[in-house]
């Protein structure tokens, strides 16, 4: 059963909203956290290093999520959205609604 055009429009909208939200977040963290202001005179340099590392991990995670969203939007534009990239079967509408940027059906995601 193919996903209806109305559901696809709603998913496209949700993906765009999430993309905009993540872009704002990434702007706050800078690329990899390097642009964040950290107090270099802080007595515990280990704490500063740990915070920089946490920001870098978070920024990388946001970048990965943005790439997944961009990929899903591209598939929506070109066709092929909602098809598992591993097995080629349709991804259930419920899964797409829960995870609009997913690349895999539930079976392939859990294997």
Image (cartoon, rainbow, N blue to C red):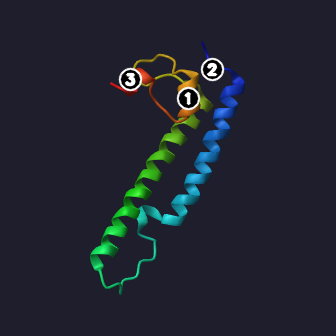
What is the secondary structure assignment of the residue under circle 3? helix
Residue extending farthest right: 6
Q: Residue at x 42, y 51 (%)?
A: 61
Residue highlighted by disc 1: 96
Q: Residue at x 58, y 23 (%)?
A: 93
User: Which quadrant would residue 9 be assigned to in this image?
Assistant: top right
What is the secondary structure assignment of the residue under circle 1? helix
Q: Is residue 3 above or below residue 36?
A: above
Residue highlighted by disc 2: 3
Q: Measured from the top left, where is residue 26 in percent x and y?
A: 51, 59
The answer to whether the residue labelled 2 contacts the one labelled 1, judged by CB atoms less than 8 Å apart, is yes
Q: Is residue 36 above or below residue 59?
A: below
Q: Front-most of 70 and 18?
A: 18
Q: Residue at x 44, y 58 (%)?
A: 59
Residue highlighted by disc 3: 108
Estimate the spatial distance between the alpha carbons at disc 3 and disc 2, rounded to whole Å. Answer: 19 Å
How many residues crowd mark 2 within 10 Å: few (<14), some (14–19), many (20+)? some
The answer to whether the residue labelled 3 contacts the one labelled 2, judged by CB atoms less than 8 Å apart, is no
Q: Measured from the top left, where is residue 74 in percent x and y?
A: 57, 35
Q: The N terminus lies in which quarter of the figure?
A: top right
Estimate the spatial distance between the alpha carbons at disc 2 and disc 1, rounded to whole Å. Answer: 9 Å
Q: Front-most of 15 and 76?
A: 15
**Relative to 7, 100 lies left or right:** left
């Amino acid at each position: 059963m193919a996903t209806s055009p109305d559901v696809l429009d709603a998913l496209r909208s949700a993906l765009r909203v999430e993309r905009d939200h993540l872009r704002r977040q990434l702007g706050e963290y800078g690329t990899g956290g390097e642009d964040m202001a950290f107090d270099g005179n802080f007595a515990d340099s280990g704490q500063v290093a740990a915070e920089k590392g946490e920001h870098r991990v978070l920024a990388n995670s946001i970048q990965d999520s943005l790439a997944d969203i961009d990929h899903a939007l591209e598939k929506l534009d070109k066709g092929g959205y909602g098809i598992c990239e591993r097995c080629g079967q349709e991804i259930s509408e419920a899964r797409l609604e829960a995870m609009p940027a997913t690349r895999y059906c539930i079976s392939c995601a859990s294997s």
